[in-house]
């Protein structure tokens, strides 16, 4: 690490998280969080990057990993899961798994790193979803987690002296989206979706906003074609 600002990005081994890492690399040293160690090692070829292979739902592992940090300027929460289906079929395990990854892990990682973020006059970025603004059939569990994430961001912004930005993208051309479309039994149409790079540019715009500006929410939708 250098004396450049430090950004920790979860879910950085692919998709939106990886695109964000590439956008922040010219100005930040990066800690790349992820589960797939092989993909994370490949992602860490980005200049100024270090793998941060921590299981976010393992409270003890998270405490140990964050205790080793001595600086953090930007925290980007990009990790998440989407399990679709009718509420009548959503088991307690589905609810727990979704909330654990999409909400609780976010809250705990932020809590543990808040002292560093405060010291740096830092920035927390939460990759939310269109499902965090409206809920549709079969998206109940996922939407509930994203509504909770939005509420968490709103309260964090009001309580803490750090900038907090919620990003609400529409459908994005990623592996996760492929899984979503499979669950929906729908065709995958990448030309109708946002690119991960477009979402990353929105994150970069929020992070690079002037000191007098606080970008609280960004909604990004695919352009009608």
Image (tube, rainbow, N blue to C red):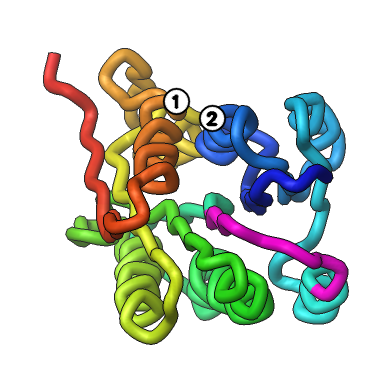
The 10 Å Cα crowd at callout 1, few under 14, some 14 to 19, many 20 or more, is: some
Closer to the eye: label 2 or 1: 2
| Residue wearing tag 1 | 197
Tell me residue 41's x, y (percent).
85, 33
Residue 222 forms part of the magenta stretch? no
Q: What residue is at 71 percent from the left and 66 percent from the top? A: 56
Based on the displayed image, in which of its 4 quarters is residue 196 positioned?
Answer: top left
The residue lying toward the viewer, choosing from 61 and 209, is 209
What residue is rendered at 34% in x and 82% in y? 155
Q: State the separation of the CA atoms marked 2 and 1.
A: 8 Å
Mark 2 burial class by Cα count in 10 Å: few <14, some 14-19, many 20+: some
Q: Earlier in the sequence, mark 2 or mark 1?
A: 2
Q: Is residue 21 visible?
A: yes
Residue under the point 80% across and 66% down:
69
Task: Return the residue found at the far bottom.
Answer: 159
- Horizontal and vertical percent position of residue 157: 35, 75
Q: Nearer the viewer, residue 67 or 96?
A: 67
Is disc 2 in contact with disc 1, using a CB cutoff of under 8 Å?
yes
203 vs 223, left or right, is right
The circle drawn on residue 218 is none
Residue matched to label 2: 23
Query: With respect to residue 82, does 40 lie above or below?
Result: above
Q: In this view, does 179 lie above or below 87?
A: above
Q: What stretch is highlighted in magenta?
A: 67-77
**Which quarter of the figure is the C terminus placed in?**
top left
SS state under label 1:
helix
């Amino acid at each position: 690490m250098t004396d450049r600002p430090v950004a920790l990005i979860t879910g950085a081994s692919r998709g939106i998280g990886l695109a964000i890492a590439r956008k922040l690399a010219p100005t930040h040293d990066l800690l790349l969080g992820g589960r797939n160690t092989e993909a994370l090692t490949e992602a860490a070829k980005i200049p100024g990057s270090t793998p941060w292979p921590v299981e976010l739902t393992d409270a003890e592992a998270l405490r140990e990993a964050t205790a080793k940090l001595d600086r953090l300027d930007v925290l980007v929460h990009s990790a998440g899961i989407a399990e679709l289906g009718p509420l009548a079929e959503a088991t307690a395990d589905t609810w727990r798994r979704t909330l654990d990854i999409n909400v609780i892990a976010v809250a705990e990682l932020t809590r543990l790193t808040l002292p560093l973020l405060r010291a740096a006059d830092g920035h927390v970025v939460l990759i939310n979803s269109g499902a965090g603004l409206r809920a549709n059939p079969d998206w109940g569990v996922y939407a509930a987690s994203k509504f909770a994430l939005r509420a968490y961001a709103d309260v964090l912004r009001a309580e803490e002296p750090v900038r907090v930005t919620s990003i609400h993208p529409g459908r994005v051309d990623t592996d996760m989206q492929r899984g979503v479309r499979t669950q929906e039994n729908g065709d995958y149409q990448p030309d109708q979706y946002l690119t991960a790079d477009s979402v990353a540019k929105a994150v970069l715009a929020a992070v690079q906003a002037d000191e007098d500006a606080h970008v609280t929410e960004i909604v990004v939708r695919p352009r009608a074609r």
